Image: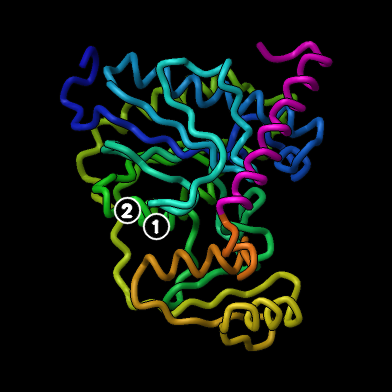
Amino acid sequence: MTEHSSSPYRRILIIADIEGSSGCGSYLASAFLTDEWARACLAMSLDVDAVVRALFKAGAEQVTVKDFHRTGYNLLPELIDPRAALVSGYRRGPVPGLGDPGPAEALMMTGLHAASGTEGFLPHTFSSRIASLRVNGVLIPEAALFSASLAPYGIRPVFFSGCPEACRQASAVLPHIQTFAIDKSVPVHRFEAAAWREGLAAAAVRSLSNRSAGPCRMEGPFNAEVRMRKGPEAAHRIGSRWGISADGDTLRFHAPDFDRLYMTLIRICYLTPAVEKILPVGLFLFNLRGLLGRMWVRRRLKAEGLGG
């Protein structure tokens, strides 16, 4: 490697989200088909590009970027170093949503957020439908779930960025992860994005030497409590749909292993039994919607004189 030759990681997987990126200052900027979202997609792309370029400069051989916000079509490929492989949209497996992680050795998560039911900037877990998620009595952020889904491939979570509360939560569930926070108290139009991006990229490169991190293996059995934001009616409707016990606004279920925990959470948040039966068609249509949304982003940015 040209720099940091002691690094044990040459193949990197980046999971990128928008809430903890430099251009997202409100819920509208994380929504779909809003002018604020278009500008947030631009900033998110520049954030990821800064990290990717720094990793290649440090000697990384392969960098794969998974766009993991909402439709999965937020990142603009033309603004990201072409040496990186950008994975947009969602896949059935082998890792639900993400697909095949390939030969990645290390996981970096950029632009993520805090867990549902906690403080932080736009906190949620999987979906804003969830008011809180506890597994064996502990509030669980997405950082732990994503990392555990990749543990069977030996992928080590080494780096995380997001708001200070999101970073604190990531450190609590992944004790050896290195973090880099973004100050969400500063309005987007006053935020020094270029300087922050430089720091983000440098911190990501430093994490290449993070030898302490190991794969995040969440061992069962698990007792999960999912409190639904829309109350008892939503909880009982979803519980009846999937055969899950509902008590007031809370769904409770037992999972013997992580795979079943993860899949049950995905069903609660995103699926119905009918949709699951036609999932290949559903994913195609959902990804098509995302692709069309990204085309809309390009038009909006061009109209504003922004973008590439």
Figure disc tally: 2
Looking at the image, can residue 158 be seen? yes
Q: Position of residue 115 (x, y in %)?
A: 56, 58
Determine crowd level at label 2: few under 14, some 14-19, many 20+ residues with C-alpha closer than 10 A. few
At x 33%, y 14%, the residue is: 57
Which residue is identified by label 1?
Answer: 172
**Quadrant in the picture for the N terminus:** top left
Q: Say which mark, if any, is on residue 55.
A: none
Residue 285 part of the magenta segment:
yes
Residue flagged by tag 2: what amino acid is it?
Answer: Pro
Q: Secondary structure at mark 1?
A: helix
Q: Is residue 176 above or below residue 252?
A: above
Main secondary structure of the magenta stretch: helix
Q: Position of residue 98 (x, y in %)?
A: 46, 45
| Stretch in magenta | 280-308
Q: Say which mark, if any, is on residue 175.
A: 2
Q: Position of residue 124 (x, y in %)?
A: 61, 57
**Quadrant in the picture for the C terminus:** top right
The alpha-carbon separation of the residues under discs 2 and 1 comes to 6 Å
Judged left or right of residue 36, residue 176 is left
Q: Secondary structure at mark 2?
A: loop
Residue 44 part of the magenta segment:
no
Residue flagged by tag 1: what amino acid is it?
Answer: Ala
Judged left or right of residue 244, residue 100 is left
Q: Residue furthest left?
A: 6
At x 51%, y 26%, the residue is: 48
At x 49%, y 55%, the residue is: 142
Determine crowd level at label 1: few under 14, some 14-19, many 20+ residues with C-alpha closer than 10 A. some
Is there CB contact under 8 Å for labels 2 and 1?
yes
